Amino acid sequence: MKFLLNLYRNAADLPGEGLDHEEFLAVAGQAGELISAHVFADPSISAVVRARDGVVTVTEGPYPQTPDHVAGQYVVDCESRERAVDLAALIAGGQAGGVEVRPLMDSAGMEM
């Protein structure tokens, strides 16, 4: 099963600060479970695009008005949800934002 691990961080924190990426990369990489990894740029330089009634609007800056934002993500292929949660715990690092573990689905809506 494939899972998306979304890392939530306070936008004021430095990217990667307090997270144990090295241990996660070693464990998931050696097990052959890591598919991809991405660290995101600061949310203040993002844009949100919306389309309503044929009108497209672009708003500068992060989408949610909260202190926590998605700071990065990993895609892993694990035997179970429990294993994905174990991997997420390696990178949570005691951060308040946490790591969301979300199953990925194929185009037919079935878990991959």
Image (cartoon, rainbow, N blue to C red):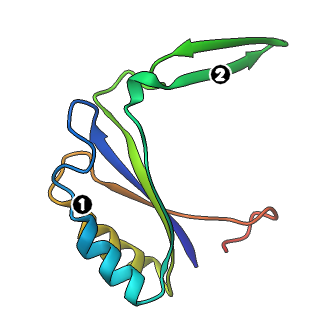
Q: Position of residue 59 (x, y in %)?
A: 56, 13
> Does the rendering let one see residue 62?
no
Q: Position of residue 23 (x, y in %)?
A: 24, 75
Residue at (33% x, 56% y) in the render: 99
Q: Which mark is residue 92?
A: 1
- The residue closer to the viewer here, 100 or 72, is 72
Q: Where, by quadrant of the figure, is residue 50 drawn?
A: top right
1 or 2: tag closer to the N-terminus? 2
Residue at (52% x, 68% y) in the render: 3
Q: Which mark is residue 39?
A: none
Residue kind at label 1, given as amino acid type: Ala
Q: Where, by quadrant of the figure, is residue 56 drawn?
A: top right
Determine the residue located farthest toward the right in the rendered image: 54
Query: What residue sits right under mark 2 in the picture?
Result: 49
- Left or right, 7 with respect to 10, comes to right
Residue kind at label 2, given as amino acid type: Val
Mark 1 and mark 2: span between their CA atoms? Answer: 30 Å
- The residue closer to the viewer here, 39 or 111, is 39
* SS at mark 1 in the image: helix
